[in-house]
Amino acid sequence: MSLTFRIVFGDAQNMAEVPDGTVHLVVTSPPYFNAPFDYPDLFPSYDVYCATMRTVAKEIWRVLMDGRIACIVCDDVLVNGERYPIVSDLTKIFMEVGFRYRDRLVWLKPEGYIRISRRSGVLLQHPYPLYFYPDNVQESVLIFQKGRFDYRSVPEEVREASRLDLNEYQKRKWYLNVWHITNVLPLKGRLEEDIAAFPEELVRRLILLFSHKGETVLDPFLGSGTTMKVARLLGRSCIGYELDLELLPIIRQKVGMDNASLLDDAQFEVIIRNDARHLRTWLSEQVKQRRSAARNAQGHSKRLER
């Protein structure tokens, strides 16, 4: 079975390289609106963010086959003290485009690791009503479907080749709508350092549950290439769109494009469009400035307490 992997560097609001109705599954995590330690000031306003997501949703609807699934990993975001309802707004956007809202999973992370900050500490400093702010250890996986799936459309041999491991399904409790999965830890020297990446295990489950071997998975926000790497390991082709051209070396390494042992059954193509951008250096500098400002503010607060 020959697998194909196409990486398009350009804006996913235009996925002209993908013909109508040729994608079997979408697995992606859009950028969280101006998240302070991932995408600070990336979008000029929340309205622009929602308009961008609506255009991408329309493109996903166009390229997805009838009856197939789009999985969107997302979460509400806190920016400058204001919370933006990304989960509910993306649900509304995808439904207005035409998708059925099929399910919502909760990805629960280990309590011992909170990536950004411990907001609950406010109550420890001020143990009174109205000072409660919970620490966030979950994200949502929104599952949308384009119409209804005709199970007769998949050949019997393909269905059998894609049979799930029921022992793993039961043992790891995939059947629940809450999945306990460790997030990508911020270890120094890791390939995805300073990149918001979701765990391979999350992508693995979604691809196994919602696609068959040999089919094509699309990730409109490819990032470091996790979806493409897992798709290849599971015998699926993949198309990825990524706006930031600076991520090309990371994707090449993660997906194994330059490793001859991985290319025996795979064909890779990289397309660089005129609308590709260079974002990683700029975003990293923005994040460093915010972290420095946060540390200075925290130090000032401690001095005042003393």
Image: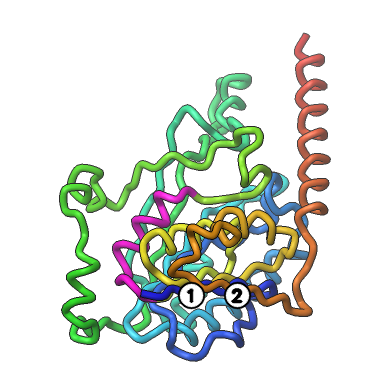
The image shows residue 72 at horizontal and vertical percentages of 47, 64
Q: How many marks?
A: 2
Query: In which quadrant is the N terminus drawn?
Result: bottom left
**Circle 2 sits on which residue?**
269
What's the mark number on residue 4? 1
Residue flagged by tag 2: what amino acid is it?
A: Glu
Q: Nearer the viewer, residue 293 or 30?
A: 30
Q: Quadrant of residue 43?
A: bottom right
Q: Main secondary structure of the magenta part?
A: helix
What's the CA distance linking mark 2 and mark 1?
8 Å
Q: Give the residues in magenta.
A: 199-215
Instruction: From the viewer's side, name the closer residue of 29 and 208.
Output: 208
| Residue drawn at x 73%, y 79% as measured from the top left | 273
Q: Position of residue 103 (x, y in %)?
A: 33, 64
Q: 128 or 10: nearer the eye?
A: 10
Q: Is residue 208 magenta?
A: yes
Q: Amino acid at mark 1?
A: Thr
Left or right, 246 with reference to 211: right
Pointer 2 local density, CA inside 10 Å: few below 14, some 14–19, many at least 20: few
- Give yes or no for contact between labels 2 and 1 (Cβ–Cβ under 8 Å): yes
How far across and down, in percent of the image, does residue 153 sit? 24, 86
**In the displayed structure, does residue 201 sit left or right of residue 84?**
left
Residue 41 located left or right of residue 237: right
Is 136 one of the magenta-colored residues? no
